[in-house]
Amino acid sequence: MDYDFSFFLAIASLVTGVIWLLYSLYLKQHPDKKDQPDPIIVEYAKSFFPVIFLVFLLRSFLVEPFRIPSGSMMPTLLVGDFILVNKFKYGIRIPVINKKIFDVDKPERGDIVVFRFPRDPSVDYIKRLIGLPGDHIVYKNKQLYVNGQPVPRSYVGRYQGIGGGKNMTGAQEYIEDLTGVKHHILRVNRMPGVSRDYVVPAGQYYMMGDNRDNSNDSRYWGTVPEENLVGKAFFIWMNFDWDTATKFGLNRVGTVLE
């Protein structure tokens, strides 16, 4: 979906830019036409090209907005959160074809990552990066192990859900310490846990949702190739949830993601 929108922005930038350029060349060859009003299509091209091209550059190389549609990352991300994603964190890529041209930084365990779903690259997913290439990941009896070590967690209490996430009310909330990255997770005792034992292949990443019993993640469909990574989520700039009484979750605005 985002892939299609990036393609649309690229084509729109190209078309409006070419129209403006060709008319500028035409005026150079016909200076007597400079005092005449520009054709309507040229007026539109001159007006829209700078805006479209700027949006294209921002979305392709700097930051991109996303909206959270589900509760798989609760309680870190709620339904209706609008987030910003750092697009250059994991390397500079050629827009549309998504080919990396050089590295900037490496993904780190604990990052909140937006990526293209391996089974359908037109769909964007967001999960937490649990396993790096070569890591041995075990999930058993709802306990996460990384390279043979249990990931520490401390109990917070019963979770109180709101809006689109109110069905998670009563879940157990923990603070998990994923090799120095502390974050909140949810667990539902009444739901059966899935067991997995997996060694992450080279060039792949193991992803899990913070809402451990309500997340379609690497435990079910495998790892994410490096080329599918879109960027690192780092900021909540708005929240709008149709299921809440106030709609706007102003207390979520300005939240820095960890």
Image (cartoon, rainbow, N blue to C red):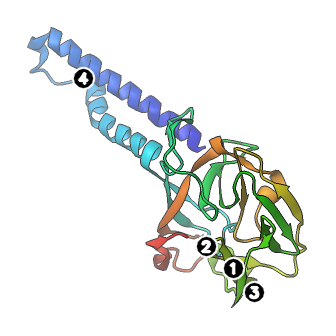
Residue 139 location, quadrant: bottom right
Disc 2 or 1, which lies upstream in sequence?
Answer: 1
Query: Tag 1, which secondary structure?
Result: helix
Q: Nearer the viewer, residue 1 or 200?
A: 200
Read off the residue under disc 3. Answer: 170
10 Å neighbourhood of mark 1: few (<14), some, or many (≥20)?
some
Is residue 213 visible from the viewing direction of this image? no
Q: Give, as a three-letter code, the residue at label 1.
A: Lys
Residue 41 screen position, x and y as percent:
31, 26
Horizontal and vertical percent position of residue 97? 57, 32
Asked where in the image residue 13 lies, by quadrant, the reply is top left
Whole-number angstrom distance, CA of label 1 to CA of label 4: 55 Å
Mark nearest the camera among 3 and 2 is 2
Q: Quadrant of the C terminus?
A: bottom right
Gap between marks 3 and 2, in whole Å?
Answer: 27 Å
Going by the numbered disc 3, the residue's amino acid type is Gly
Q: Which residue is mark 1?
A: 166
> Residue at 27% across / 25% down in the picture?
42
